[in-house]
Amino acid sequence: MKFKEKVKNEFKIFREEISRLEYAFWWIARIAMLYALLKARRGDFAHDLVLQFWAKFLASFILPAARLLPKKIFLARLPYRLQTAALFMLSVTSVLGQFGGLYSSTEWFDLVMHVIGGFLGVMVGYMLTKTLDKDGESMTPVISAVSGFGLSLFFATAWEIFEFFTDTLIEGSNAQNWMVLSSERMIAFFPEVDPRRHVLFDTMTDLIAGVVGTTIGGTVLFFYLYFKNRKSRNNK
């Protein structure tokens, strides 16, 4: 297939998969991320934070570009709706969390984002599993939910590993909140926490929040697919 024909075909698929509201959200999120990036470059932001803004902004264009690759490549088969979930997390964490300062000023913000991330991770995991299923056989609701649940837990664990290496390799990094900038009220909910356990405390509460979001997401996905399949059978 020629490149021009492939672009036309992908545009048709895109129109079928994505609503106008979702597409509008894509550009609102990108514009907000670009604004945060430009302001961060001119303001008093650390160099590594500016690089993170750059990485997240560029990541917002990866999926549509990847769809133009040959279909035998895994990335070219990912659904466009995956971009919506990714853009939500990228824009909220960068614009509100980092640029807006909610990570440091609102101690519950990080936990809430891990819950939401766990929920969205199930949906992303489900979409990835469907993409890998080259035979096109429909999976049962249980298998779909378990697949999404497992991949979401993997994403949550991988993120905590990433935070560990970030704090280890980058001077001044506080991904694991080892500086405990705004966690006093959260820590107060637990018995006396030895300051040496603050990093572990942050990692474990993040993982617990991720498991909560993943459990909710897996349950919602199971019942959504269950009733969808039953409705489809009844209509035949």
Image (cartoon, grey):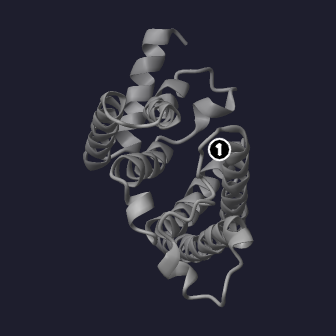
The answer to which of 158 and 124 lies nearer the viewer is 158
Q: Name the residue under label 1.
A: 131
Rendered residue at 62%/32% (across/down)? 75
- Is there any visible trace of residue 136 in the rendered image? no
* Residue 164 x/y as whole percent: 72, 51
Where on the picture, by quarter, is residue 190?
bottom right
Q: Few, some or many C-alpha atoms within 10 Å of disc 1 (few <14, some 14-19, many ≥20)?
A: some
Rendered residue at 38%/59% (across/down)? 102
Question: Quick one: SS at disc 1?
Answer: helix
Identify the amino acid type marked 1.
Thr
* Residue 118 x/y as whole percent: 58, 65
- Above/below status of 192 relative to 82: below
Residue 80 is left or right of residue 141, and the answer is left
The answer to which of 69 and 230 lies nearer the viewer is 69
Q: Residue placed farthest to the front in the image? A: 195
* Residue 224 x/y as whole percent: 51, 72
The answer to which of 225 and 178 lies nearer the viewer is 178
The answer to which of 159 and 167 lies nearer the viewer is 167
